[in-house]
Amino acid sequence: MIFLALLLTINLGCSSNDPEMPLEDLDFRQEMRDFVIDISTYSHSLAPNFMIIPQNGIALITSNGEPEDPRATTYLQAIDANAQEDLLYGYEDDDKRTPVDVTKELKSLLDISYAENKKILVVDYCWTSSKVIKSYAENNDSNYISFAAPSRELDKIPDTNTTLNNENSSNITSLKMAKNFLYLLNYDRFSTKNQLLTALSKTNYDLLILDAYYNEEIFTKEDVQQLKTKQNGGSRLVISYMSIGEAESYRYYWDSTWKKNTPDWLSNENPEWEGNYKVKYWNKDWQNIIYGAESSYTDKIIKCGFDGVYLDIIDAYEYYE
């Protein structure tokens, strides 16, 4: 989603990578591009076919976020797709049509990314039958694959008795082959991990985008391997969610002492999502949590056998701008 700048007081410090640089001299967009590029480079050193999918922040694909601006070539080369929330439904309210001017602005950039041979994934938040049908049809006409999410909490698998958009039994071995996907992050409806795995295994989605953790337990390699087969026998891809623009207090890396001894990179809590905190994503200490060591988030995801990462809060630069 394109966020308006939040009217919050921010206790900002300089980048740990260059402590002498004044904050006003930071290019927040380029800092995010560089962060994603570094995650991509590091991931590919461990798993050459690992996929990088940023969600939102589509303006990063050009130098200043306008369609006529030069392409951010190095950034585009580092990613495999662009994902976008609320393109057709959900921008102002769930199950409500996104304003035409917003859709037009987003599509002008998404289409550039598509022309650069990047897959486009759209998450629309709608559940009224007629709107779900329109969402799938219009996104399909734009050559995007999409998921009509029935809940902003991303806690529901749509009824498996209904016809799946572009359902197929093909073996999906690359992102370009995927014709549909499921986006599921909240597992509160599933009383056990096995119940969750069983429910997912009974679906025919070409691509699953999931949280790598059930409660505080990360999926095993065997769990992920089980999910890579659709119910109809075809193979599919399994991608892990990872937020890089906010820290989450329910993650393995969270230190309870941070509330009293706040790290330089940790900022204000997101008023929209309890337990999510803005981060100075250009700070090396935060980046070390995300990638670069065996204990990092990225390493854990790769070791579990996921096919890639779905990077969230890419548009964190808007908050700091």
Image: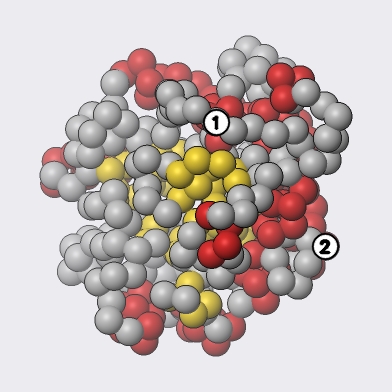
Mark 2 residue element: helix
Mark 1 residue element: loop
Residue with the mark numbered 1: 10
Residue with the mark numbered 2: 45
Q: Nearer the viewer, residue 211 or 129?
A: 211
Q: Where is residue 253 in the image (x, y as percent from the top left)?
A: 60, 66
* The quarter of the displayed image where residue 119 is located: top right
Q: Which amino acid does label 1 sit on?
A: Ile
Q: Which of 248 and 22 is in front in this view?
A: 22
Answer above or below: position of 310 versus 63: below
Q: Are marks 2 and 1 in contact (CB under 8 Å)?
A: no
Q: What residue type is labelled 2?
A: Ser
Q: Position of residue 89 (x, y in %)?
A: 28, 35
Left or right: where 155 falls relative to 27: left
Q: How far apart are marks 2 and 1 (CA)?
A: 36 Å
Q: Residue at x 28, y 36 (%)?
A: 90
Left or right: where 130 falls relative to 283: left
For marks 2 and 1, give the one nearer the viewer. 1
Quadrant of the frame with the N terminus:
top left
Crowd class of label 2 (few under 14; some 14 to 19; many from 20; radius 10 Å): few
